[in-house]
Each structure stands twice: as C-alpha cells, then as structure tokens.
Amino acid sequence: MSRIFLSPPEVGPEERQMILDAFDSNWIAPLGPDVDAFEAEFAEFVGVGHAVALSSGTAALHLALLLEGVGPGDEVLVPSFTFIATASPVCYVGAEPVFVDCAASTWTIDPDLVAAELEERARGGRLPKAVVTVDLYGQSADYDRLQASCLEYGVPLIEDAAEALGGTYRGRQTGSFGTTGIFSFNGNKIITTSGGGMMVTESAEVAERARYLATQARDPFPHYEHTVIGYNYRLSNLLAALGRAQLRGLASRVARRRRINHAYREALADLPGVEFMPVADYGEPNYWLTCITIDPELFGVDREDVRLALEEADIESRPTWKPLHLQPVFAGSRTVGGSVSAGIFERGLCLPSGSAMTSSEISSVTELVQRLSR
Ligand SMILES: *Cc1c(COP(=O)(O)O)cnc(C)c1O
C-alpha cells in the first residue's frame, strides 16, 4: 500500500506529449505559442474576454491588486477563512487586509457582513479600496449579493478562484464574477502546471497592462527602456503546454472529485457528530477537497485524533484553513466577526480528494474513520 495524499497532481500521456512537443518546437521561453493558446483556451472556458498566464496564483493576485490601484494606506476586505496567499499580496502592495468571517451555510465570505461593513464604512468615508472573495475548496461565494454590494459603493471585487476552476455559480464559471479573477495551477490544485496561475478579465487594457508588468515593464523600444518597476511573473511556454493538456482533462477531474465527495457522504454522513461542508444551492462546486467537521462530544474523538489515526495508516489529511485573523502574522488586524471560521477550524478536516483516487483508497479512509466513531 502506498501513501494516500491529500490532492496529488495527476498527469498522463497527453501531458507528456504536449510538453515534449513544446520542447521540440524550441520555445523554451517565458513566451511562445503554448502560452498564447493556453490563454485563449482558458478565457474561452471561463467565459471571459482575456486571460493572462502567470507564474503563480499569488502573482496573479498581486497584479490584480496593483491594477485596481490598491496601494500603501489602503484597506482591502478579505475573507478570514482562506489560505494566506489570499491576503499576502494585499501586504505586498502596502495595504492592510481587513478580515471578514464566513457564513456557516457556505463557508465562503458572509455577504451580510460585507454589506454591513461597506455601509458603515461609506458613512464614515473609509471605504476599502477593494473586496477580495474566495471560492473556497471549490465552492463559489454568493456573487449576486456580493456584486450588488460592491456595485452600490463602487468598490472593485477581485475573485480568488484559485481552488475553484470548473465550479459554477448560477450556471456560470467561477472566476468570472470579479472585475478581475485569479486561478492557481499549483501542484495540489484541480489542474496543475507544477506551478503557475492565471488572471482573467473582461478588459483588454487590464490584460495588456498585466502582461506588461509581468515581463519587467519593458517599454516598446529596441533597447531596454523602463518607466515603472515591473515583475518577472510570466508562465513559461513549457508549463503552458502542460496546462493546455490539463485543461482538456478538467471536466473528467471535476466529475471524479464529485464522485469521491459522494462516496465519502454515503459512508460518513450518518456517523454521529460528522458534518460535511454545506453545498450551496446556487451553484455546483468543483469538489476540489472534501471537508468534514467532527464534533468530539458526539463522535467520540476529536479532529486531531482522526487526523493522527489516518497519518498512522499513511493517509494524508489536513485541518481546514486556520482563519487568517488567528494567524500570528496578522495579530492585531481589523476583523469583522470571526467566530464562525474559528469554530470550523477547531473541528474541520480535509480528506484525501485527488482525482486519481481509487474506490479501495476511499474505503481505506472511510473504514478507518468509521472504526474511530462511537
Ligand atoms: C493556492 C491558493 C492561492 C495561491 O496560488 P499559488 O499558485 O500557490 O500562488 C491563492 N488563494 C487560494 C485560496 C489558494 O488556495
């Protein structure tokens, strides 16, 4: 028996072939035909005008904030219940994150709290420079309400869809609800380029500016001429070839992750004290990770006992995100609410959910969890 990982990359002969083709074409560069094709295919899939391939999701978010004009002294509303990479780019640009709790019914940023916070800040003349939302574990945030609030106060919405490629909200692809959206192709995400990311936008001007900033902000001269400081954030052509092959397999990956989620529900949903991350009725997640909460009073042992027992059996699982307002690096940050995400963190566990997981691997997990319950 080999180790069962949380969400390992899954690549096959098509990925291998496309990388070799790119290699043989001699485009071993941070630019090239596979980058252009990956961007075009990706934009079409998400249903947006433009996509810009970048070196990571974090880089994509950094550029998105810069392009919305976020800078020193600004504040940005960010969900507390997420990976730190949602908030660190806010700090890169010298702004301050303000952490907003999630709704218990979706685990995504609470639209009531966002609306109330924007209203109060509008009255005090201290509107944030942007709102960043996260489509958590593959489930979209509630965009009808979030977009309405942002529109009302003229605050740009940036959608961090790093975990949610292939999920939908009211039939539309996640990533398409912000003025800009970002995705990640890190090794553990639903598709991977080993490392990489994408920014999407309807604005040709924003896309052009992102490409410019991502290639050291080179002005159009035969020599190297620069009027602003740029970054080295472009995706290499070889990795774009890998991404194109992965994108072709996305629908099947989503289908398999959904089946894994359903298999876990069938085996574990009736155990005392076990609850699954709720699926909102407004959309269909990509089921990137299946997450549960464990109430130790009812279940018999706590989340950490379950995680360690799985680890003992060489099965990787992980606590749900530790809320950012509880992270030492953000001690003292402004926070709106916080008890909902703190409660989920105390009890939450992400189960192995890789798209290549076999039924017998799923059974190894579920049988062990069943044995631990009272
Ligand atoms: C993975 C992730 C990111 C960062 O993406 P990278 O490609 O690893 O830089 C940002 N936000 C969320 C919510 C993520 O899960």
Image (cartoon, rainbow, N blue to C red):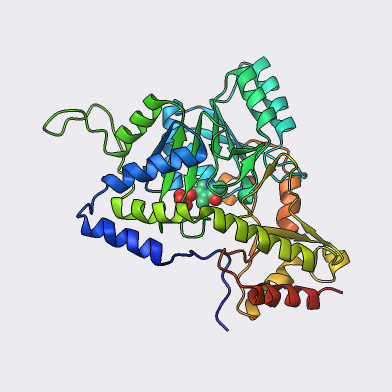
Q: Count the marks: how many?
A: 0
Residue at screen point 22% across, 59% down = 24
Quadrant of the rendering where the N terminus is positioned: bottom right
Can the viewer see residue 284 in this picture? yes
**Nearer to the camera, 61 or 193:** 193
Q: Is residue 123 above or below residue 117?
A: above
Q: In the image, residue 138 lies at what x, y percent? A: 61, 49
- Tell whether 107 sits left or right of 228: right
Q: Residue furthest left?
A: 222
Q: In the image, residue 205 lies at what x, y percent? A: 37, 24
Q: In the image, residue 129 lies at what x, y percent? A: 53, 25
Quadrant of the rendering where the C terminus is positioned: bottom right
**Nearer to the camera, 297 or 58:** 58
**Nearer to the camera, 85 or 330:** 85
Residue at screen point 23% across, 54% down = 28
Can the viewer see residue 349 in this picture? no
Q: Quadrant of residue 16?
A: bottom left
Q: Residue furthest bottom?
A: 1
Residue at screen point 70% across, 55% down = 345
Residue at screen point 22% across, 52% down = 27
